[in-house]
Image (cartoon, rainbow, N blue to C red):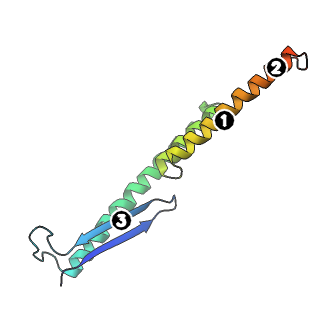
């Protein structure tokens, strides 16, 4: 009986890897692997994913050492980008947050200018 194994692995950052290992050739329909070989194929793929994740996390940790070269607001944006690359946040979440902050800053600046014009605020 042909077997197909799908293994889903969740990572700490919310990503998931799906490994599909097939006992048969989907084109010819012929069985090409034993069940033990299918399990080894899936294990090999997961080991590769694990090693890639370890490399990515090591690079992220190295990148966090750059904080000393940034202002607070710059670093905040750098961390958001690193979070996107690590899969902890989506681009939409970050873009929405940045848009809201930009909008709030415009409103605060408009309020500050109005207060200055009315003599209620001095720099």
Q: Which residue is mark 3?
A: 18
Residue sitting at x 43%, y 56%: 54
Q: Residues within 10 Å of mark 2 (few under 14, many from 20)?
A: few
Residue displayed at 48% across by 50% down? 86
* Residue 24 versus residue 57 in the image, above or below: below
Identify the residue under disc 2.
Answer: 114
Q: Quadrant of residue 74?
A: top right
Residue 48 on image: x %, y %: 33, 61
Between discs 1 and 3, the one toward the N terminus: 3
Residue 67, visible in the rendered structure:
no
Label 2: state its secondary structure.
helix
Residue placed most toward the observer, 48 or 6: 6
- Relative height, residue 13 to residue 22 (above, below): above
- Front-most of residues 17 and 51: 17
* Mark 1 lies on residue: 101
Q: Is residue 99 left or right of residue 106?
A: left
The vertical placement of 18 against 84, above or below, is: below
Q: Dot 3 lies on which element?
A: strand
């Amino acid at each position: 009986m042909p077997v197909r194994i799908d293994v889903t692995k969740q990572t700490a950052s919310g990503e998931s890897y799906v490994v599909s290992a097939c006992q048969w050739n989907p084109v010819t329909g012929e069985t090409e692997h034993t069940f033990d070989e299918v399990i080894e194929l899936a294990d090999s793929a997961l080991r590769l994913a694990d090693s890639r994740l370890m490399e990515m996390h090591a690079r992220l940790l190295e990148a966090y050492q750059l904080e000393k070269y940034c202002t607070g607001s710059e670093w905040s944006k750098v961390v958001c980008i690193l979070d996107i690359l690590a899969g902890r946040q989506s681009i939409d979440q970050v873009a929405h947050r940045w848009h809201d902050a930009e909008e709030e800053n415009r409103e605060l600046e408009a309020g500050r200018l109005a207060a200055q014009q009315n003599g209620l605020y001095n720099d």
